Amino acid sequence: MKFFVDTADVAAIRELHELGMVDGVTTNPSLILKSGRNILEVTKEICSIVDGPVSAEVVALEAEAMIAEGLKLAEIAPNIAIKLPLTWDGLKACKHLTDKGHMVNVTLCFSANQALLAAKAGATFISPFIGRLDDINLDGMELIRDIREIYDNYDFKTQILSASVRTVNHVREAALAGSDVMTAPPEVIRKLAQHPLTDAGLAQFMKDWEKTGQKII
């Protein structure tokens, strides 16, 4: 499963990229606001760090305006994935932009039917929001499994990009469900390395090593 990092924090992206933990980046208007930077400027810098897809989101609501904004964002770098909302106008824009050869990430997906439409419109990525479904007592991971089965049934090439990932369990379950990609905040990716038994074992090793009185260097 590919790891995308869900942030516009350039320092965090650099750190994870150096460890080989970043296959792409996803951003949205909320993350751009949090960064405090101009969308074109910060997105260009991110694209210079990461070779994989960098999702940059339009803010227009009508198809024609979405297309215009998407083309402007695509000028930033060749690895831009234009991020569009899963609305009827968003699907129209998706079809137009993918027909022109652009990568498109269709976001705010909450049903298998929506995911089916996105695949029919040629989306490169579909972004089902796991955490937000969990928030309203629905099973976000069930949606991932449903989309996986539908896409496999008809050999759709659209990649499932599990989004709104909030916990390490979300990552594991998405991988088991066959998600092609997951995107998560940097802190969630870092937590994947943590386990209390690892900490306890390391503490015991250090205690025993100190008793030997030895040094390696």
Image: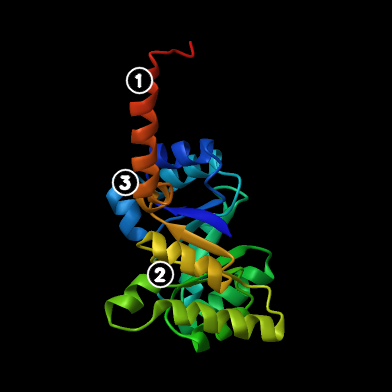
Q: What element carries label 3?
A: helix
Q: x, y percentage for residue 30?
A: 31, 59
In the picture provided, is 52 more to the left or to the right than 137? right
Could you give the CA–CA distance between mark 3 and mark 1, rounded to whole angstroms?
44 Å
Which of the 4 image quarters holds residue 130?
A: bottom left
> Could you tell me if residue 120 is visible in this image?
no
Classify 10 Å Cα crowding around label 1: few (below 14), some (14-19), many (20 and above).
Answer: few
Circle nearer the N terminus (2, 3): 3
Classify 10 Å Cα crowding around label 3: few (below 14), some (14-19), many (20 and above).
Answer: some
Badge 1 amino acid: Glu
Quadrant of the frame with the N terminus: bottom right
Mark 3 and mark 1 in contact? Answer it, CB < 8 Å: no
Badge 2 amino acid: Ala
Which sits in the foreground, 217 or 153? 217
Could you give the CA–CA distance between mark 1 and mark 2, rounded to whole angstroms?
62 Å
For image coordinates 61% across by 76% down, the residue present is: 95
Q: What element carries label 1?
A: helix
Q: Mark 1 points at which residue?
A: 210
In the picture provided, is 187 more to the left or to the right than 13? left
Q: Which of marks 2 and 3 is in front?
A: 3
Badge 3 amino acid: Ser
Classify 10 Å Cα crowding around label 2: few (below 14), some (14-19), many (20 and above).
Answer: some
Circle nearer the N terminus (3, 1): 3
Could you give the CA–CA distance between mark 2 and mark 3, rounded to whole angstroms?
21 Å
Q: x, y percentage for residue 124?
A: 61, 68
Above/below status of 210 relative to 49: above
Q: Mark 3 points at which residue?
A: 35
